Amino acid sequence: MGTSPDVVYKYTPDFDGCLTVDGCESAYDQMMWVVDEAMNIIAWSDDGAACGTSASQISWMNVWNGVLYYYVVDGYGGAAGPYTISVFTRDCPPPVTCPDGALAGRRALRRSVH
């Protein structure tokens, strides 16, 4: 996606769940994204806030058993250098349940300012 060299990893989980992909130990300004088998970008990060650096972190990414994913590590603006990525399994947050009478979906919240 840029002028930096890319590194691509393949991963097929043997479970349904959530992952965090962490590049916080990278020594350069890093970007990271994950694509599925159809080459759809399903997660992306540039400057992960949890890292406190210009490295990347993708948190709470859903994955499914038997689906092939590609993890792409890239540099920003031609940056390159040593890096480490770590992949952690996580318990997914529980699904949000709408209370009786609520409408599912996104709606703008309007507030009066006095």
Image (cartoon, rainbow, N blue to C red):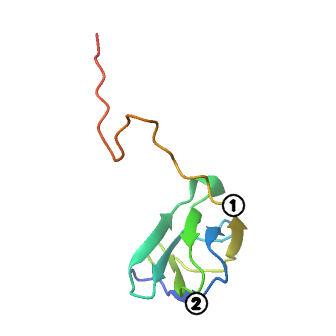
Residue on which disc 1 sits: 91
Task: Give, as a three-letter code, the residue at label 2.
Answer: Lys
Task: State the SS at label 2.
Answer: strand
Q: Is residue 60 left or right of residue 34?
A: right
Residue on which disc 2 sits: 10
List the single residue furthest toward the top: 114
Asked which quadrant contains residue 59, the reply is bottom right
Q: Position of residue 100 (x, y in %)?
A: 43, 35
Asked which quadrant contains residue 80, the reply is bottom right
Residue 51 appears anywhere in the view: yes
Q: Is residue 100 above or below residue 86?
A: above
Q: Is residue 111 left or right of residue 31?
A: left
Question: Foreground residue, 34 or 99?
Answer: 99
Q: Position of residue 60 (x, y in %)?
A: 59, 61
- N-terminal of the two: label 1 or label 2? 2
Q: Position of residue 110 (x, y in %)?
A: 28, 27
Crowdedness near tag 1: few (<14), some (14–19) or many (≥20) residues, C-alpha within 10 Å: few
Please state, as top left, top right, bottom left or bottom right, where the C terminus lies in the image: top left
Q: Position of residue 34 (x, y in %)?
A: 50, 77
Task: State the SS at label 1.
Answer: loop
Crowdedness near tag 2: few (<14), some (14–19) or many (≥20) residues, C-alpha within 10 Å: few
Q: What residue is drawn where x is 58% and y is 90%?
A: 10
Q: Is residue 9 above or below residue 98?
A: below
Residue 56 appears anywhere in the view: no
List the single residue furthest toward the front: 100
Q: Which labelled disc corresponds to residue 65?
A: none
Q: Report how far apart the C-alphas of labels 1 and 2 lie in the structure.
A: 22 Å
Task: Give, as a three-letter code, the residue at label 1.
Answer: Asp
Query: Are the residues at dot 1 and dot 2 in contact (C-beta closer than 8 Å)?
Result: no
Question: Foreground residue, 87 or 108?
Answer: 108
Q: What residue is drawn where x is 55% and y is 88%?
A: 7
